[in-house]
Image: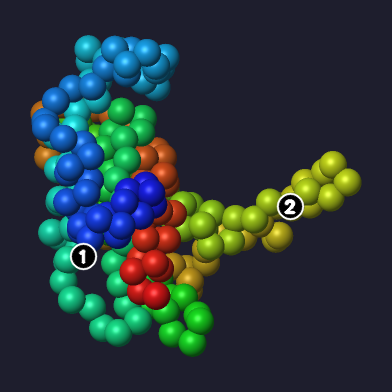
Amino acid sequence: SSFVDELAHATNMSTQDMWHQLLGEDRYINPANEGFKYTNYGETLDAFPIDTKRLKHVLDDVITKSGANNKTSEGEAWGISTHRSFVSYVAVATKVRVKDNKVSVLEMHSSIDAGTVVNTDRVMSQQEGSMIFGLSIALMGEISVKEGAVEQSNYNDYPVLRMSQSPMIKTYIVQSDEVPGGVGEPGTPPAAPALTNALFAAT
């Protein structure tokens, strides 16, 4: 997803406009038609089609609700990213501050379209956790190998963000009549690119 930002920067477009241009018109996509083998997370494309309209909608939703297009202070910036995983659609907007070569993650917002939602609290907590996990990987997720063995063993030397390190997090659930999708991990993939895109914009 950071490559989308690179394209936007190279062509002097907003990231939001670049996503819309790349995704194109509202349609269902079948990767098999392009020669790709795609498992669709074990679900049929008939029941869970790849829908560009839903992907664009969560992106626009998180930008609007987070204020990611608003002007920021010097050294601060927003980064956005969007992704479809576990047949759900998620977009993340992250605001950072870079001062004296130190990074502070100020806010993370996500919008999720997981189809028909039965347990709102469960979706919210899963989104919060998956964003924390994605941010932890991006900031501290180094795995090193020595003499053929991984050196990290547990959370003592492979840390996850502590509460004192976590930014303000907000999740927005897009109301949908579609078939329920997964909510366990979809917030993780767009977390790192939203962060790196924000860092680039801030510096």
Whole-percent x, y for residue 119 in the image: 25, 38
Quadrant into which the C terminus falls: bottom left
According to the picture, the residue beneath numbered tag 2 turns out to be 144
In the rendering, which numbered label is found on residue 119?
none
Kind of residue at badge 1? Ala
Q: Residue at x 64, y 56 (%)?
A: 142
The amino acid type of the residue labelled 2 equals Ser
Contact between marks 2 and 1 (CB within 8 A): the answer is no
Q: Nearer the viewer, residue 74 or 59?
A: 74
Count of numbered tags? 2
Q: Position of residue 68 (x, y in %)?
A: 21, 65
Q: Which mark is residue 68?
A: 1
Q: Residue at x 40, y 68 (%)?
A: 199
**In x, y percent, where is residue 139?**
53, 62
Crowd around label 1: few <14 · some 14–19 · many ≥20 (10 Å): some
Q: Earlier in the sequence, mark 2 or mark 1?
A: 1
**Image side of residue 36 versus residue 59, left or right:** right
